[in-house]
Amino acid sequence: MERAAIIGVGWYGLRPTTPEVSFREMVFEAATRAYEDAGIDPRQDVDAFLSAQEDFWEGIAIADEFAPEPLGGVLRPTVTVAGDGLQALANAVMLVQTGFFDIVVVEAHGKPSDIASLGEIYEFALDPIHHRPVKPAHPLFMMAFDAQAYMMRTGADPSHLALVAAENRARGLRNPRASYAAKISVDEVLEAETIMDPLTRYDIAGYVDAAIVLVVARESVAKKLSDKPVFIDGIGYATETGTGTLEWHSWGRMPSMRVAAMTAYAQAGIGDPLSSTDFAEVEDRASHYQLIALEELGLAPEDQAHKLYERGEYELDGYYPVNPSGGSLAMGVALEATGLVRLLEAVLQLRGEAGGHQLDGVERAIVASWRGPPTTTSMVAVLSGPEMGF
Amino acid sequence: MVSWDKRALPGDIIHYPGKQEADYYLYPPGIHGKEAAELLKKGKVPGMLCGDQLFLPPKTFCPDEEMSEGTVVEVEGPFLAALVTVIYEDFYGRSLEEPQVLGLITVPGAVGGYLGVIKADPEMVFPGMRVKPVFKKEEERTGAITDILYWVPEGD
């Protein structure tokens, strides 16, 4: 079976506000750039379009009907995946691997600055029988529970969380796409206002508007069209019992990410991810999730991620760089586009186009994201750069 | 005017405000939900047995290989806050008038727990603390989770 490859990427936004465009124009801007990058005409060359979006984020019911036009998908097969962009990418890979689709476009966007009641939308995502009526003062309370459970299990303390927050935000200073980059110390993270114990203001990522568009092609087609394809060696996703049974979540862990990783690694033929890949872009919309992700991905032994982090193993010049982009803590959360932001950064690294935070000689990467609170859905992909593919 | 002629001055940017009309909906609790509601009305805490494993709160399906349906049972305690956080700010960064203590309240050996507000001094709460439910008066109960007004530390 042929692999799928990314032959074009385009993005727009990655800023806290984008008042100059509507969400559809933001998608158009990203799509135009992706098609230029791939050297294709969407009206002639694309066989299907996949859009990742969610009605309540758009403020429009049946919002998928808004997807075709800004992508160039009018009167073409277009379908919406109600999930993170990485889930849409997984579906694109499956379409390509049927052999009936040579080129498929994937789009995800988030425009939280348009959502005047973002907090209430998150409340509305909570279980209406057991959670919403309790009126939690912050709808993302589950992040605090996960942080506490993680620390109780591993012996980590708030300084380990703050170290992740400070380092990721500092790394973003080299990344022009990182709106929340900052030179901030561990002490400043610890001394900031506590939002919900044990998380302070700087442990939690902010929001950005962004649209990401990918052009995905069958391997043989990709090699004809592009001299820099990035191959998708494996991709998986999974959900725990779900938001409706959030109480049953494995607190302080992400078993959905572990399952997604096992799926992706098996497809990619990877046994040990540490020795088989060069770096990772991983989930970090709150600082502790980066530590949890490292363990679930097999990039740290059980309960040890915080100790390895303390030793500098995941720094840019460490044994295994993690989130050279600065992650969501530096780049922000773009709702359903968040996973594709991680993927965009990995693609640019593998193409040698990351700029100021480019890593030397990287050929293979892991991308891992979470659909965000209150979901229990995770996605993992393994990518190979152009040098590995030929 | 084409798409690259973007407007940049604040006065040029307009929005059309809108409202998502989804603020009224009826949520059926399902067959097991009705059994759980009956227990709540009696001032009892419901759980669900899937084989020998207790789950809190009861939902319709067991997360097992057989996709079986569980049995709703009364849970007598002892209750403890397995996880507990103190919330100081809301989603928009506004300080709360009073911090809210929120816990995941369970019994030893159970999977899951009830999300519940704990009426306690934020300085005195900790994971693993024993708590007990405070119910509404019997005549005011409706079978909803809000029949539990809040939880308090055991001994209060």
Image: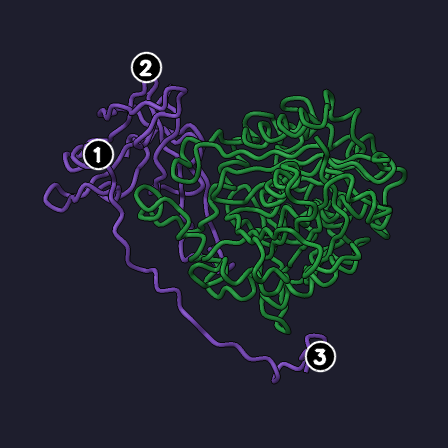
Chain colours: A green, B purple
Report in which chain the residue with disc 1 lies. B
Residue A274 showing in the rendered view:
yes
Report in which chain the residue with disc 3 lies. B
Q: Is residue B126 above or below residue A211?
A: above
| Farthest-out residue, bottom | B11
| Farthest-out residue, right | A360
Label 3 vs 2, first from the N-terminus: 3
Please identify the quarter of the rendering in which residue B130 is found. Answer: top left
Q: State the image coordinates of residue A355 (x, y, percent, origin top left).
A: 85, 52
Q: Are marks 3 and 1 in contact (CB under 8 Å)?
A: no
- Which residue does the image show at 77% across and 44% down from the upper left? A221
Tell me the quadrant of the picture where the C terminus of chain A can be found.
top right
Q: Nearer the viewer, residue A312 or B127?
A: A312
Amino acid, disc 1 = Ile
| Farthest-out residue, left | B139
Amino acid, disc 3 = Asp
Separation of marks 1 and 2 at Cα, in angstroms? 21 Å
* Residue B52 disc label: 2
Q: State the image coordinates of residue B145 (x, y, percent, origin top left).
A: 26, 41
Label 3: few (<14), some (14–19) or many (≥20) C-alpha neighbours in 10 Å: few
Residue under label 1: B31
Please identify the quarter of the rendering in which residue A46 is found. Answer: bottom right
Number of marks drawn = 3
Residue under label 3: B5
Q: Are marks 3 and 1 on the same chain?
A: yes
Separation of marks 3 and 1 at Cα, in angstroms? 58 Å
Mark 2 residue element:
loop
Which of the two discs, 3 and 1, sits closer to the camera?
A: 3
- Which residue does the image show at 15% across and 38% down from the upper left? B41
Which of the two discs, 3 and 2, sits closer to the camera?
A: 3
Mark 3 residue element:
loop
